[in-house]
Image (tube, helix red, strand yellow):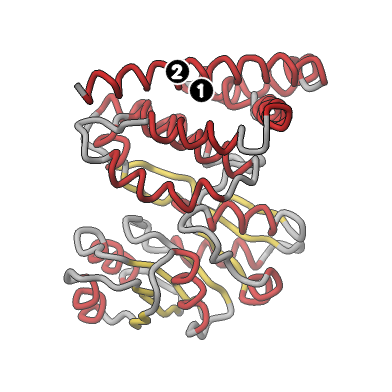
Amino acid sequence: MLSIIIPTLDEEQHIQKLLLQLSAQRNVSFEIIVSDGGSKDATLKIAKDIGAVIVSGEPGRGKQLNNGAQYAKGEYFLFLHADSGIENKFQLKDSLDFIKGLSEPSAGHFKLNFSCDDPKVKKFLSFFEWKSSYNRDGTFSGDQGLLISRENFDKLGHFSERFTFLEDKEFALRFAEIGNLVTLPGEIETSGRRFEAEGPLERSTLNLIIMSMFHLRLFDFFAVAPSIYREALDSERLDLFPFFQTALHQIFGDGFFRAIFRFGSLGSWANANGWQIFLWLGTRSNNPQKFISIYDRFFSKLSRNMVGDIFVSLIITGWFFLKLFTTWVRFRKKAR
């Protein structure tokens, strides 16, 4: 049996659609577990009326996912976000058959399909849709869902509860040490609401800051990020200066020379992800695979070395301080 585990916190606007779509799945035995973190709206009533098992506990996605897994009865777990969507009625069956047919320890995720009303934002998000179909380092996110056997989930020791978010990234890094992440048949719909509300460039920049702090293991950033985010949302557009300011303090927290090392580490990490620039170029011309092939066959051989790492480190450092300055100027103008 498959146990579908969905963490929720005031998700009445999205949970019904997902639960009805899951209830329509065919040729697969499953249970739906809604692991709630203290919803004050109608989330739990909606879930109960549709037949989901309700599990309540402390808020925090890692905690909620683990809490749901604790009550799960299935041999396989599928972790989904509440604003996800699965329209293909045979997708869960096909995905289970696919993952069971693999010989090596494997966990699966779906290709993303963003739902949004703004066609310009939708076009912007096509990059992330294509990116989600690849199985390269750093491409997995919890929005894609995670299908994994109970055995492998228990072997890893469950999701980290240290973070208020990014528990999916941390889990994927650990899983890569024992098995493979694969793309499952079908796709999963996810909401592009944050990109529309906050601005696609602003949201993407924030995601880059978050992933940079995660790469550097500067985990104190994540303790204060939620409160910064709530304050930043009070403005008409997402205010990025407090995030850059906090990142600056984290990077230089152990002194100047340690900061130089950290910018160097970011450069090496960014250089290793240079293929994403070619993917973006490919999405603009509707031929991403051609551009990825160009990177793999030619550009990666020229750039993946110490000189390339240093060059990218300088670009990253310059970009960081330029964005810090421009967001500070915007912040000052708004404060007047």
The residue that label 2 is drawn on is 284
> Residue 313: where, in percent of width, then height?
68, 20
The numbered disc on residue 105 is none
Quadrant where the C terminus is found in the figure? top left
Q: Is residue 15 left or right of residue 94?
A: left
Q: Is residue 177 left or right of residue 2?
A: right
Which of the 4 image quadrants contains residue 38?
Answer: bottom left
Q: Is residue 141 above or below residue 122?
A: below
Residue type (three-letter) at the residue carrying disc 2: Arg
Q: Residue at x 78, y 22 (%)?
A: 304
Residue type (three-letter) at the residue carrying disc 1: Trp
Answer whether residue 129 is visible to the viewer in this image.
Answer: no
Q: Front-most of 7 and 160? A: 160
The residue that label 1 is drawn on is 280
Circles 2 and 1, Cβ within 8 Å, touching? The answer is yes
Q: Residue at x 26, y 68 (%)?
A: 20
Q: Is disc 2 surrounded by few (<14), some (14 to 19) or many (20+) residues within 10 Å?
A: some
Q: Front-most of 329 and 166? A: 329
Q: Residue at x 54, y 50 (%)?
A: 220
Which of the 4 image quadrants contains residue 288?
Answer: top right
Q: Is residue 133 above or below residue 154?
A: above
> Residue 32: where, in percent of width, then height?
38, 76
Tally of numbered discs: 2
Answer whether residue 247 is visible to the viewer in this image.
Answer: yes
Q: Is residue 135 left or right of residue 261?
A: left
Q: Residue at x 73, y 64 (%)?
A: 105
> Residue 209: where, in percent of width, then height?
50, 35
Q: Is disc 1 surrounded by few (<14), some (14 to 19) or many (20+) residues within 10 Å?
A: many
